[in-house]
Structure formats: structure tokens, C-alpha cells
Amino acid sequence: MRPRKSSGNCASIAACRSAADRYATSHIGKWHMGDIPESWAMNNGFDYAQMAVHQQGQLTIFNDDAIFEGVSLGNADYVPTYTIDSNFRPDASAMMTTIEGEAGGPIHEIRMEAGERWNSEKYNEMNQAFQDKAMQELARLAGGEEPFFLQYWPLLPLDNTRAGRDGPQSPNGGLYADKMQLVDEWLGAMFASMEELGVADNTIVIVMGDNGHFTKYSPQSGYTPMIFRGGKTDTTEGGVRTDAFIRWPGMIEADSLLNSIVHVSDMYTTLARLAGADQFIPRDRLVDGVDQSAALLFSDEQKARRDHIIIYSNDKPKAIVKDQLKLKLPPPGENPIVAKFYNLYHDTREEYSVSTEVGAWGGQEFVRILNRHMARKELYPDTPPAFGMPYEGVENIRPETQAAVNAYVVRREAPKQ
């Protein structure tokens, strides 16, 4: 994101050239918010989106190559002659892959023809196409008069097959490490393009992960949970801590470190402030993010505005971190005296509870944090999830995809029969 020139501020790849209240927005790559129209990027504030309907776990495992290599079991590893329920193992190639469209306009699936099989080569082609499109969007938006926000989420480095493997090969032979090198090349190309376009100094770039690594892929990935225990879906630090880097030449000091708690939701409020768009932050609901702009712009670590975080699993709070202390919330019906506290400075893997040392005075303080949070949620309850028909509104749905939707409807209605 790029700040307005008039104020010297702005914000992720995004840019500002005037004091106008109009911001151009594009999303490229992974979205992973659902397969119904209410969840798609072009229907949630982005002017344009080219996005994968499903996440890389499905797209890199649910394909013919992965089945052949034994990475994926269940989709086609059976003899259909002796199978009664053909819907039990859906055809992965019937999934919708990449869709494209503008806000309020038609939406189409792209780069998949009727009857075409999804495989590792198609997955790699899709990721390269996202990189190419992100570069095109960067050039287009940087050449406009409006401030812009370009959100680019590659589906790499998740890659689970040897089929179609090319490009860099890491010394340890890990598929993910290979793809990390490729993503590094892609980022370098974007930084070089920003220099050529003359927007590098007035652009904030954020590169960050979205969760800990997927531990089930550890043996073949080249990664293992070492300093922090756990991975994706865990509420341990290995599941929720991620790397994050922010680049804003001349504004954020190079090679500086922020040793404070920053939550992903803080990016929303922080970038809105830096972009001069904080007037658009809703005031009629609970907003999780806090403005961390001072923490980024000044070397004084005390400028950070967050000293605790509540860690959820789905829709339930499971842990609270306050300063360096972490409470693992006991489940309903369990005596709270057995609640486990951890000192994350001394025990990054959360293996040795210090409940006796902390619980006597800290238990009630953590309860106060949780009660305040839950009271606010009563005043501003969560929006319930939306339900609908998969892929509805896509104008060129493939026949095999429509057949898969029809089968989904049959299975959904089966309990009512």
C-alpha cells in the first residue's frame, strides 16, 4: 500500500497520489473464505479479483498426480466397478479453480475447460499466472491517480507432489523449501518493478505468514516445529506465531525489530491510519485491530499498543497471552485450579506449566481480561456465517462442476429424507 504524497503516509502493496477519498483495490491469489458468492473478494470491497476459490491444501492434494504418488487417498484410489456410492469419493477435477471478476460485474472461471483434468502442472501454472497478474496489477495501479491497495496471496509454498517439479532445488530437497526460493524470486521481481515504476519510496509492503506450518507435512517439507511447539490449527505458539516483514523506505528503519505483540487484525487499523483512510473504519461494531503505526515508525518499543491477545479455535477462546504469560483456558466443567500457565520467555514450547507461581495472583487477572472481552461481544455479537449454493453466479460453470454441485445438494438433503 502506498501513502498519499500530500501527507507522506499510506499503506501493503498500496499507493496514494492524491487527497481523494477513492481507493483502487485489487486481490490476486488465495482467498479461502468459502465457495459461495457472499465470501468472494470481488463481493467484499475489492474492485477486481482473480482468486482461487479453494485453498492450496485441496488444489495440491486433490488431483490425479497426488493420487498416483500416494499423497492423496480416497479420491480415485478404488475400483469403481464394485462401488455403490459414487458420491462418496468426489472427482477433484470437478472443483472450481480460479475465478475472476469486478465488483458488481460478471464472474467467470478461467484457465479450466470442460472435461480438463486438474493436476500438478495446472497448479503450478495457476500460481505463475497469479504472480504475472499481480505484476500487471502493480503496474496498472501505480500508473493511476488514485491511492491503491494490492493484496497478493500466493498459494505457494504448499506443494505436495514431485510431478511438475522444476525451478530451484534446495540442498535438503524439501518441496516447500524449493517453493520458498521461488516465492523469494517473485518478491524480488516485485520490488524491482516498484523501483522501475518510481513508487518504492512511497509504498508500504507487508510480507507475512497466515499461520504456523502444517505439521502433518513436516517430514517432506524440510521444516519441523523446533523453537515453538505445534502448527496450523494449534493454539500453541507454533500455531499462531508467524514471520512478518514491513518495508517502507525512509519511514521504517531498515533491519529494525518490533519486539511487541502485533495481531493480524492490527494491520487493518494501522494501514487505514497510514493511508489517511481511518475515517472509513466502522464505529458501529467491535473492531479487533488497534493502531500500531507509532510502533512501526518509532524505535521506542513502548509505543506498541497491545499487551495481550485472546487466541481462538474456531469460535471459542482457548488461550490468553498477557505480556510473556500464557493461560490455556480449561474446558467447561473442569476445575479452574488445574488451568495451565506458561512463561513464554523461559518455555517457548509450552511444556512446563508455572501454574502455582502465576495462578495464585494471575488467575483472576486473566479472567478479568476474558470477561471484558465476552461482555463486549454481547454488545457487538459476531455476524453469523452465510450459507448458500456453491459457485452460484459464476457464468461459465463447467458441466462436471454443476454435476458436483447437484451431488452436494443430494447429500445435504439426505438427512431430511
Image (cartoon, grey):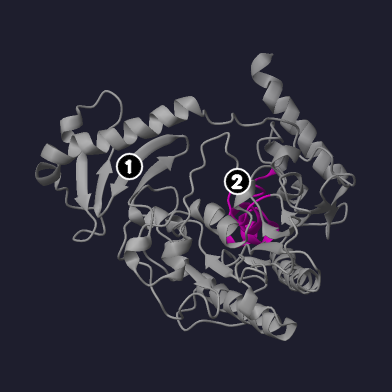
Amino acid marked by disc 1: Ala
As helix, strand or loop, the secondary structure at mark 1 comes to strand
Figure quadrant of the C terminus = top right
Asked if residue 71 is among those painted magenta in the image, a careful observer would answer yes
Range drawn in magenta: 54-79
> Which corner quadrant of the image does residue 21 belong to?
bottom right
Query: How packed is label 2: few (under 14 Cα within 10 Å), some, or many (20 or more)?
Result: few
Amino acid marked by disc 2: Ile
In the picture, measured across the screen, residue 187 lies left or right of residue 142, that is left
| Closer to us: 315 or 54 | 315
CA separation in Å, label 2 and label 1:
27 Å
| Closer to us: 9 or 363 | 9
- Residue 264: horizontal and vertical position, in percent? 49, 54
Q: Residue at x 89, y 44 (%)?
A: 395
Q: Does the rendering let one see residue 243? A: no
Q: Is residue 310 above or below residue 145?
A: above
| Closer to us: 261 or 17 | 17
Q: Is residue 177 above or below residue 108?
A: below
- From this viewpoint, which residue is outermost toward the top? 417
Q: Which mark is residue 60?
A: none
Q: Tell me which label, 2 or 1, sits earlier in the chain.
A: 2
Which residue in the protein does label 2 denote? Answer: 281
**Are the residues flagged by discs 2 and 1 in contact, CB closer than 8 Å?**
no
Figure quadrant of the N terminus = bottom right
| Closer to us: 115 or 197 | 197
Q: Residue at x 54, y 72 (%)?
A: 175
- Residue 267: horizontal and vertical position, in percent? 53, 56
- Residue 334: horizontal and vertical position, in percent? 23, 27
In the picture, measured across the screen, residue 97 lies left or right of residue 223, that is right
As helix, strand or loop, the secondary structure at mark 2 comes to loop
Q: Does the rendering let one see residue 301? A: yes
Which residue in the protein does label 1 denote? Answer: 319
